[in-house]
Image (spheres, grey):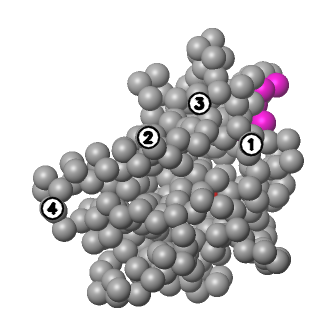
Amino acid sequence: MKYFESVKEYLEFRKTVTDKKIGLVPTMGNLHEGHISLAQRSMEDNDFTVVTIFVNPKQFGPNEDFARYPRTMQKDGDDLKALEMRVHKKDSTKEIILLAPQSINEIYPEGFSTSVKVNGLTDKLCGLNRPTHFEGVTTVVYRLFKIAQADRAYFGQKDYQQFKVIDRMVIDLEIPVEMHMCPIVRDQDGLALSSRNQYLTPPEREKALVLPRTLKALSFLIERNPWSQALEKVTKVRAEALRDSKWQYLQFLDADTLEEINDNTRTILIAGAYQARGARLIDNILVERNA
Ligand code: PAF
């Protein structure tokens, strides 16, 4: 595994590997099995996998957890090395490049004044509660795309709206990178893995399971009923669930457009955000519309 703390050094290295396929896995560190699954998928598809670790201040709101966001560089490096060793048992040519800029200036040098904003897709779901979040995400991901110069990029489905927003940016700005979305990884109890889960006490976590359980119940109803009948049932379950004021949203949308479901909708996105005491959690399920 190669390790770079400086963007400049990475760029020097990047010039020497023009004949390799490169996959990019952007992260904010504190890696869990969800991140590792992205890196593993990238290693299957590419020669080099660039994992970036950068806690991006621009995507945190003023009262959010930027300062206390868990930073666990040593363990993250060990986990990536362990992944690389596992992959090397099958193919020793695959390599991980860890790019972990040590200062905010590396990504946003003195005087940095540009931001990238995707309109429309960012006005809904998480955008309602986190109005500046996606602009921070697209700005940093644009920077990481330019720096990494990867052929492919890998993101988790857990942040489905984030994927759609970045994908829109890639299309609109003609960024030459192939976007890949990888499945949500869940703990045994069904909670989607997230670095923020560790903010939850065991009882809070138990209560927060209402998020994956409700999404699952709704997806069953949609899978098992023609949409015209499912609609009535899911509307009832949703209304019942929303009596718990901790839900920030619980929505069914067209998964392609993030617009209301219409006659052309093929895949339905069921997405929820739940404000548990210790952490704001998000989750989603994609389900094919039944007739
Ligand atoms: O999904 C994340 O962890 C972050 O939003 C990302 C894509 C690494 C940008 O900082």
Label 4 packing within 10 angstroms: few (<14), some (14-19), many (20+): few
The alpha-carbon separation of the residues under discs 1 and 4 comes to 39 Å
Which of marks 4 and 1 precedes in the sequence? 1
Give the percent coordinates (x, y) of residue 135.
76, 65
Q: Are marks 1 and 4 in contact (CB under 8 Å)?
A: no
Q: Main secondary structure of the magenta part?
A: strand
Residue 287 seen in this snapshot: no
Label 3 packing within 10 angstroms: few (<14), some (14-19), many (20+): some
Residue 75's disc number: 2
Q: Quadrant of residue 56?
A: bottom right
246 sits to left or right of 171? right
Which of marks 2 and 4 precedes in the sequence? 2
Q: Are marks 4 and 2 in contact (CB under 8 Å)?
A: no
The alpha-carbon separation of the residues under discs 1 and 3 comes to 16 Å
Give the labeled residue for mark 4.
Answer: 91
Q: Residue at x 24, y 65 (%)?
A: 94
Furthest-right residue in this view:
62
Q: Nearer the viewer, residue 138 or 235?
A: 138
Q: Residue at x 32, y 70 (%)?
A: 48
Give the labeled residue for mark 3.
Answer: 197
Q: Are marks 4 and 3 in contact (CB under 8 Å)?
A: no
Disc 2 marks a residue whose amino acid type is Lys
SS type, badge 3:
helix
**Magenta stretch bounds:** 245-250
Which of marks 2 and 1 precedes in the sequence? 1
258 sits to left or right of 194? right
Q: Nearer the viewer, residue 148 or 259?
A: 148
Q: Residue at x 64, y 70 (%)?
A: 106
SS type, badge 4:
loop
Single out the mark in the foreground, 1 or 3.
Answer: 1
